[in-house]
Image: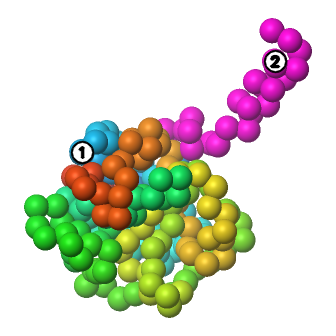
């Protein structure tokens, strides 16, 4: 192997995102069991230091079981997979309005940061046009989405199961959406 190829391989290994190798973060961690085309477990290290109100809402909804059996309703190849509509996104019901709802909890004011950027595996809160309208929906980025920086709240990073995220059915909505069958929190 040439010296340049060895150096390139070493640099690539050093530059790999931390979430691709870690299996546990400082937490709290959100564990999502996914069923469908993507079948497996995704673990997200939530970041209360960046978005304390958003993380608190996600944790509360997960502990209530609100995210259980919610579909991935908007999945755009090369961009992101969106889920978390606990009002209209329950699998086994009419999900034609998935993406239009939230939860019975109040909307959360924006918690934008310049300490992190939307890169592969970053989790952000979905919202309407109003920056202070995030509620329960969130998305996981497939790649660089730094154009969202300063416009959407970053709430976590995938630390395990990005291969599962990559396998989620694409579509707006997907013909056969993948489902978060069980979502739990480890603090």
Q: Is residue 157 above or below residue 146?
A: above
Q: What numbered label is drawn on residue 6?
A: 2
Q: Identify the residue under disc 1.
A: 36
Tell me which residue sits at (33%, 49%) in the image: 169
Of 182 and 56, nearer the camera is 182
Tell me which residue sits at (24%, 62%) in the image: 70
Question: Residue 59, how many percent across, how many down?
Answer: 36, 67
Residue 17 lies within the magenta run? yes
Question: Residue 104, how many percent across, how many down?
Answer: 25, 84
Q: Main secondary structure of the magenta part?
A: helix
Residue 122 lies within the magenta run? no
Q: Secondary structure at mark 1?
A: loop
Q: Are marks 2 and 1 in contact (CB under 8 Å)?
A: no
Residue density around tag 2, few if under 14, some if 14–19, many if 20 or more, within 10 Å: few
Taking the image as shown, residue 71 lies to the left or right of residue 142, namely left
- In the image, which residues are magenta? 1-24
Asked which quadrant contains residue 76, the reply is bottom left
Taking the image as shown, residue 80 lies to the left or right of residue 85, namely right
Question: Residue 167, how many percent across, how many down?
Answer: 38, 42
Q: Is residue 79 above or below residue 41?
A: below
Quarter of the rendering occupied by the N terminus: top right
């Amino acid at each position: 192997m040439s010296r340049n190829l060895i150096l390139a391989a070493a640099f690539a290994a050093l530059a790999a995102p931390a979430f691709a190798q870690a299996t546990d973060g400082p937490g709290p961690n959100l564990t999502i069991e996914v069923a469908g085309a993507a079948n497996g477990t995704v673990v997200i290290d939530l970041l209360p230091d960046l978005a304390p109100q958003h993380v608190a809402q996600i944790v509360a909804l997960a502990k209530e079981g609100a995210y259980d059996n919610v579909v991935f309703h908007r999945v755009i190849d090369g961009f992101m997979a969106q889920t978390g509509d606990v009002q209209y996104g329950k699998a086994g019901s009419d999900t034609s309005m998935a993406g239009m709802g939230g939860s019975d909890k109040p909307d959360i004011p924006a918690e934008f940061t310049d300490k992190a950027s939307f890169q592969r595996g970053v989790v952000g809160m979905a919202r309407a046009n109003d920056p202070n309208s995030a509620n329960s929906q969130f998305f996981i980025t497939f790649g660089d989405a730094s154009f969202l920086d300063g416009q959407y709240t970053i709430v976590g990073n995938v630390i395990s199961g990005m291969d599962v995220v990559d396998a989620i059915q694409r579509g707006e909505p997907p013909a056969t959406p993948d489902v978060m069958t069980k979502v739990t929190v480890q603090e």
